[in-house]
Amino acid sequence: MKKVYKLLFLFSFFLLLFFLTYINLPHIEEIEEKNYIDPSLDIVRLNTNLYFVGKKGIKSEVRTMIVKNEAIETTMVQNLAIGAKNKNYKSIFDFNFSINDIETFNNICYINLDVNKNDYSLFNEEDFYLYIWSLVNTVTEKEDVLKVQILFNGEKFNKELLGYNLRNPLPRLEWLLYQKIEFPIDIVNMFIDYISVERYDLAYGLLSETSKNKISYNDFKILTNEFINEIKNYNKIISFTQNYSNYSIAVYKYENLENEFIYKNWQIILEDGFYKISLENSINDKKK
């Protein structure tokens, strides 16, 4: 009888030990079929930004991509060609361009596009550069891609765009991304950013029509260069807006290491529903 009790005790002990061991084991949650990736396949799921052309610049869209046995750059461009969720956004692939091949060497991605000779009309469009940089900015989301060389039917195309040439590899340009202008001072911040990197063409486009009629493009470059040189050794310490019935004044205060101050005033008006800078009434400075 004692043997029976002993066996029952040992059985109960080992059963309890097994139970305690089981509940302390790490458990793997069941993966939904849609999220399961077969480890035997060379597949990667990742999120990235794709860049499309909108009415006012380049717009970004987050996309979850499945990379299957091919370069990430190729999958990025293929997803760009599929199109944006917002059907108002476009890419170069909405104009009868198609992907031939894509390869990356020495941090430069070479994208060879097929295009019919009759479809080169896009090259003459005013916003053609946006379609190029939607492609460039999309591929350079991959950290080891620093520049993009675009080929058309296997050949380089000689065309100047924003101070660059399509014959050469193009860098990423963050400032082409659309920035929403909500307040008058936003347009001045954008204007100063443009002239700081010598993008005079874009800065000139932010002027009112009256300012453009009064100030030639060459005079504009001279005037804005003088402004940049004047504030070179100063730091902006404050900016604010004064609103009036027909215009607003954005006031910027700059200070140097000698505790000297410069005040710069920028007049902003509404023109056809957009904020524009009235340059002939701006950059009036006061030194203290």
Image (cartoon, rainbow, N blue to C red):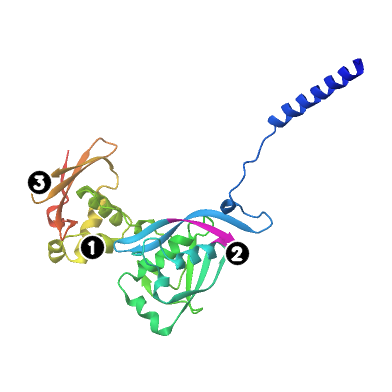
Give the quarter of the figure containing the N terminus. top right
Q: Are marks 1 and 3 in contact (CB under 8 Å)?
A: no
Near mark 2 (Cα within 10 A), the count class, few <14, some 14-19 or many ≥20, is: few
| Disc 2, SS | loop
Tell whether 101 sits left or right of 59. right
Near mark 3 (Cα within 10 A), the count class, few <14, some 14-19 or many ≥20, is: few
Residue 129 percent across, percent down from the top left: 36, 68
Tell whether 248 sits left or right of 99. left
In the rendered image of this protein, does residue 18 appear above or below residue 183?
above
**Magenta-tinted stretch:** 62-72
Tell whether 114 sits left or right of 187. right
Q: Residue at x 73, y 28 (%)?
A: 19
3D distance between C-alphas at marks 3 and 2 = 58 Å
Which badge, 1 or 2, is on the more N-terminal residue? 2
| Disc 3, SS | loop
**Within the image, what quadrant is residue 167 found in?**
bottom left
Is 64 inside the magenta-drawn segment?
Answer: yes
Question: What secondary structure characterizes most of the magenta part?
Answer: strand
3D distance between C-alphas at marks 1 and 2 = 42 Å
Dot label at residue 205: 1
**Within the image, what quadrant is residue 102 found in?**
bottom right
Q: Amino acid at mark 1?
A: Gly
Q: Amino acid at mark 2?
A: Glu
Q: Nearer the viewer, mark 1 or mark 2?
A: 2
Query: As rendered, which of 237 and 189 lies closer to the eye?
Result: 189
Dot label at residue 244: 3
Dot label at residue 70: 2
Q: Residue at x 60, y 64 (%)?
A: 70
Q: Amino acid at mark 3?
A: Tyr
Q: Nearer the viewer, mark 1 or mark 3?
A: 3
